[in-house]
Each structure stands twice: as C-alpha cells, then as structure tokens.
Amino acid sequence: MITVTSPLLPPLEEFVPYLEKIWESKWITNMGHFHEQLEKALADYLGVEFVSLFTNGTLPLVTALQALDIRDGEVITTPYSFVATSHAIWWNGLQPVFVDIDPVTGCMNPERIEAAITSRTKAIMPVHVYGTPCDTTSIRRIAERYGLKVIYDAAHAFSVSKNGRSILLEGDVATLSFHATKTYNTIEGGALICHSAEMKQKIDYLRNFGFEDEVTVVAPGINSKMDEVRAAYGLLNLKHVDKAIARRKEVARQYVKGLKDTKGIRLYEPIMRSFINREVQLNYSYFPIFVKEEQYGMTRDELYEKLKSEGIYSRRYFYPLISTFSIYKELPSASPENLSNANLVANEVICLPMHHGLSEEVVEKVISIIVEKE
C-alpha cells in the first residue's frame, strides 16, 4: 500500500534516550524541559521570535481569535482548506465568510477578500495552501485599509520562506500543524507564532486555563499544552527535517518530469516554478495534480479509484469544499456561484503520494499508472 503521506519517524534508538530522561525527571507535561527547548529550537529554525506550542494544530487557530480579542462578527476565509479552519471561527461564535480562490495557487483571491468586507468584518483568515504563500502584500494592504486582523493558517507552511524571510512573520499571528501527516511532526501538535512578548504571554495564559500563577486566573483559557513526549519527539524530528524536505523536492521533480506532457493533467504551477525561481522556498508538503476529464479521458474520481485498485492511496485534497458541509452550506457566501474557482479546483484535484520515504521506483509506478491509464 502506498499512501499520500508517511510520518517523519525518527530512528527508535535515537528516541529512547529522550524517553529515559522524561522517565527519570518524572516531568511529563506542563511546560517541562523538552517543551521549553522545542519552543526555542523552533523559533531559531523557523526564523521567528515567539513560538507557543499546542497539543494539536486546531487549537492555535481557536486561540488566535481569542488572543486578538475578536469576539463577534465575521471572519473572511477560504472554502478550500481543511475544515479546522472554519471550525475555529465557528467555535468562537463568529461567522465565516467564504471567498473564492486563485485557481493557480489555491490561495484566497485578494480581490474577492475586499469585495466581501462589511461593517461586521473583524478579521481575515487565509490559508497558505499546500505551503504556497498567499499574496501577503495585497492582504496586508487590505487589512490596514479596513483595520482588520490577519490570522494565517500556515498548517502546510513549515519552513516556507519568501525572499529569505519566513512566511510565518506575515499577519498578526500564524498557526502551524505538527500532525503526523505533515512535513514536520510531533505525532500530534501545533504552534502559534506571534510578534511580541506581550502577545506570547497572553497566548500562553489562554493555552493553560488562563492561569497567571497558582492562584490567579486572568482569562477563560483551555488546556491545549503540548506534553513532554511529543516535545521530545519534535526535537529529534527537527534534526532530520532538512533531509526529509530535500528528498520531497526530488520526488516532486520526478513527478513533474514524468507527468508534465500528459494530456489532461494540470500540474501545480508553484511547485514547477520553485525549481527555477528561488524566491520562494517550499517544503513540498503535497503534490497535487488536476484532472481535466475531456482531455484526459477519465474523471478525477475514476483516476482516484484506479490508483486505489493498484494499492496507491491518493487524496482528493481539498474535496469536498468546506462550504458544502451541512453546517455552512446555507451561508450566503457558500453559494457555488460565489466560489466558481474553488468548486472547479476541488472537483479536479488529486494529491499524489508525497513523502521522504518514497523510492524512485515507487514514484515511477505512480507516474506510469497515470500516464498509461490502462
């Protein structure tokens, strides 16, 4: 079986000493030694100043809205994402407003963002889709013009940079996911990136029930701290992530070479550009292709089933659109007419297996099934 993703697993013999230290210290959670070490190591690696670790990648999104004091109103976001993006808005008692995407990158179209702003708009929550940076310059200008907060869902964008600067420095805050399927993982986990010591302190209160000290609670926080085992796992994985990203890049290069002339298959342009233009450094978290039925002679779903029959488990990511789920589909902004590009892309996309453990032979097998179709 060949799957879309495979976790970045550190060598077991290297992980055992970490576990032994945790066992000896008897400190297994509540901001222990490895937790503090990982926050610092990630800040250094990612080129940011303030990192707050979380137990998964959804809770940073929920906490970001609280930390920025966004209490009511609307948050403009994308339907082309994992459902955690809009769920975080819903859990804060806010209304998501969906806008259409750029059909090339899959990221939010800034022109559609500005058109969706009303007197109730409080924030913008864009997603760096497949790790490709949004048009952060345009989004910043819009946010400044209308006095809006910007929260970047950067779940896919670990280590991504533009012109040598971390993409995580954009917006008021940015969130990461360290789920096992991501380029870098802590089994489960996540982080919230901010730009001041004061904001980090507020975030850290919110992720620990709002405790300031043993007897003082300053905010209605929740328990979303990362434990020591996952922090240790993350420290070890950090030592191996550069090698994993380099291998992913070679897998992406092999896919492009093998599929670029296949009629009816559109490749993801930001990945192809990344081999020529070094302005944006990607992490090759996913490898999406887009199936044009009329030219290819097979629907996207038929190709998906064909791959599955050969033991290759791809993923239609992101399909269905968030805006089609029952809790959101009645929103005015969820109308298909409002989201024509997002609907088109969602109905064509397949993400092929993409991880550092793929051999050239396996990648060639995937390519041959797509090219030959028989």
Image (cartoon, grey):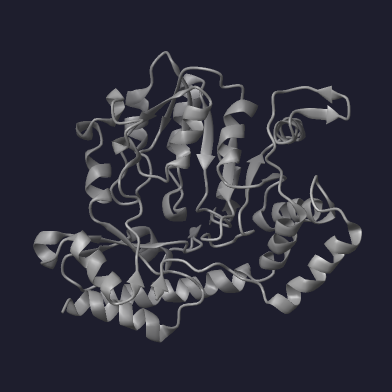
Q: Image height check: is 37 above or below 70?
A: below
Residue 114: quadrant of the picture: top left
**Is 280 placed left or right of 81 in the picture?**
right
Q: Position of residue 103 (x, y in %)?
A: 28, 48
Q: Residue furthest bottom?
A: 361
Residue at image position (38%, 17%) is: 118
Q: Quadrant of the N terminus?
A: bottom left
The correct choice, above or below, for 173 with respect to 186 in the image is above
Left or right of residue 118: residue 214: right
Count of numbered badges drawn on the protein: 0
Looking at this view, is 94 or 78 the one in front?
94
**Residue at the top extreme, as displayed:** 119
The part of the image, by quadrant, that contains residue 76 is top left
User: Residue at (61%, 69%) from the top-left corner?
Assistant: 242
Q: As rendered, which of 147 and 51 lies closer to the eye?
A: 51
Q: Is residue 309 left or right of residue 210?
A: left
Residue 327 image-quadrant placement: top left
* Coordinates of residue 337 in the picture (x, y in percent): 19, 32
Instruction: Report the residue at 50% width, 22% height from top.
Output: 93
- The front one of 144 and 180 is 180
**Which quadrant is home to the C terminus?**
bottom left
Give the residue displayed 58% in from the left and 43% down from the top: 175
Q: Is residue 355 above or below residue 350?
A: below
Name the spot of residue 222 as percent of width and height, x first: 68, 32
Q: Is residue 315 above or below residue 134?
A: below
Give how far across and how far down residue 201 sits, in percent. 76, 33
